[in-house]
């Protein structure tokens, strides 16, 4: 069986957690190929990804061109390479490709919270994701919450395949040197709730004046609001906005953070929460699904729309009340397991087409 992986959406350093997902999954799939061939179809920005790569003459940053290429020319490339089944890890599929396809849905935020999207982006999300959900042979959801959303909005069931976490995060747990700062790694989109966190952090510093806050992640639609809140709250000296950072710097922040906070209003999985648990960082996060199911009993949970609830959780974290079971618990989430489950879904999609 020859598997094609549609990685045309990938913008290195520009698509957040879905890049981490793709790179780790490709490596794990290749390690478990066992007679299967894997061809990764990438764009000019990404270049080579995986042992066998077919670079396509398209740039993901030019979204209309990328979409047009995916829909019109990627099917030709798939046929030319003799692909038997396609994995689409970035929400959308080449609809005209007449071969079995498995599409991964990380969330359905465009359906749950359309207010977080720019008006001219919504038609793309609504049209192509609906078509991909309905036309794919099989679907993969990264959490039970996303599976339920697929059932609710598109009437399609999905196999739940959780993310994994890299071994390097577990290595951090044994050599942590906590400093006096909290860490929040996330794109500055409105639903990531940075402004509320900053308000709460300003209150927290009344009792912890030396405490700092490190923010990392791709600059998103709420970047200007975040910067303005920092100025208005007088936090210029205590909040560091580092934007996107290399992997080595990210790992160092996990290693040295006194605590991890994740106040997001909406998530499909919550990969940074799992990373923090694996690294042994005391964590406090939103009590929304799927974070509640992911972290309950291993992190402090709070209501992300209630300042007092968030403040109380952070005070408890600083007082040493966060659970210390995260690293052991996170061991069950491996990219190897994610790859094995994904291969099972791909095999099933291929068999369905072969027997039809």
Image (spheres, rainbow, N blue to C red):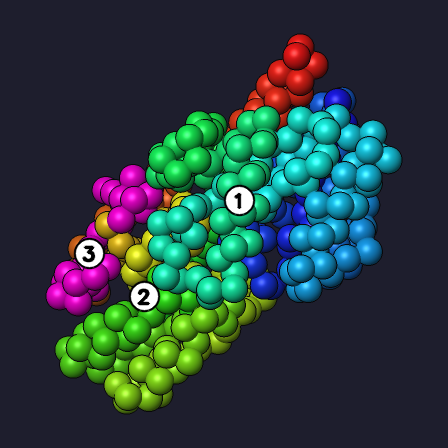
Q: Residue at x 86, y 35 (%)?
A: 80
Labels 2 and 1: the sequence-earlier one: 1
Q: Residue at x 21, y 72 (%)?
A: 200
Instruction: Label 2, secondary structure: give it.
Output: loop
Residue 296 belongs to magenta span: yes
- Mark in the foreground, 1 or 3: 1
Residue numbers of the magenta segment: 288-314
Q: Which residue is mark 3?
A: 303
In the rendered image, residue 2, in percent from the top left (x then y), is placed at: 76, 27
Could you give the CA–CA distance between mark 2 and mark 3, rounded to whole angstroms? 12 Å
Q: Along the line of sight, which residue is nearer the eye, 221 or 291?
A: 221
- Give the image quarter of residue 306: bottom left
Q: Which residue is mark 1?
A: 129
Could you give the CA–CA distance between mark 1 and mark 3, rounded to whole angstroms? 30 Å
Q: Report if the CB atoms under discs 2 and 1 are less than 8 Å apart.
A: no
Instruction: Label 1, secondary structure: give it.
Output: helix
């Amino acid at each position: 069986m020859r598997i094609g992986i549609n990685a045309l959406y990938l913008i290195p350093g520009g698509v957040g957690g879905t890049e981490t997902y793709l790179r780790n999954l490709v490596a794990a799939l290749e390690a478990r190929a066992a007679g299967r061939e894997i061809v990764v179809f990438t764009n000019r920005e990404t270049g080579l990804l995986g042992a066998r790569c077919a670079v396509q003459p398209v740039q993901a940053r030019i979204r209309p061109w990328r979409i047009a290429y995916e829909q019109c020319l990627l099917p030709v490339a798939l046929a030319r390479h003799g692909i038997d089944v396609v994995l689409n890890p970035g929400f959308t599929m080449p609809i005209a490709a007449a071969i079995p396809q498995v599409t991964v849905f990380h969330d359905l935020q465009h359906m749950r919270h359309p207010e977080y999207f720019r008006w001219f982006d919504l038609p793309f999300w609504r049209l192509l994701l609906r078509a991909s959900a309905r036309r794919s042979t099989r679907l993969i959801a990264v959490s039970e919450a996303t599976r339920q959303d697929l059932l609710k909005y598109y009437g399609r069931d999905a196999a739940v395949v959780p993310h994994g976490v890299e071994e390097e995060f577990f290595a951090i747990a044994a050599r942590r040197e906590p400093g006096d700062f909290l860490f929040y790694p996330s794109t500055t989109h409105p639903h990531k709730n940075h402004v509320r966190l900053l308000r709460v952090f300003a209150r927290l510093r009344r009792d912890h004046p030396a405490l700092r806050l490190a923010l990392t992640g791709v600059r998103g639609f709420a970047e200007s609001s975040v910067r303005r809140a920092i100025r208005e709250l007088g936090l210029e000296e205590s909040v560091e906005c580092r934007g996107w950072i290399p992997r080595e710097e990210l790992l160092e922040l996990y290693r040295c953070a006194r605590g991890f906070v994740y106040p997001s209003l909406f998530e499909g999985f919550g990969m940074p929460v799992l990373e923090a648990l694996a690294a042994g960082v005391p964590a406090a996060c939103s009590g929304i699904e799927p974070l509640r199911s992911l972290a309950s009993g291993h992190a402090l949970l709070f209501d992300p729309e209630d300042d007092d609830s968030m403040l109380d959780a952070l005070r408890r974290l600083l007082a040493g009340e966060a659970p210390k079971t995260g690293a052991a618990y996170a061991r069950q989430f491996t990219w190897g397991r994610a790859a094995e489950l994904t291969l099972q879904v791909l095999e099933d999609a291929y068999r369905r087409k072969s027997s039809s």
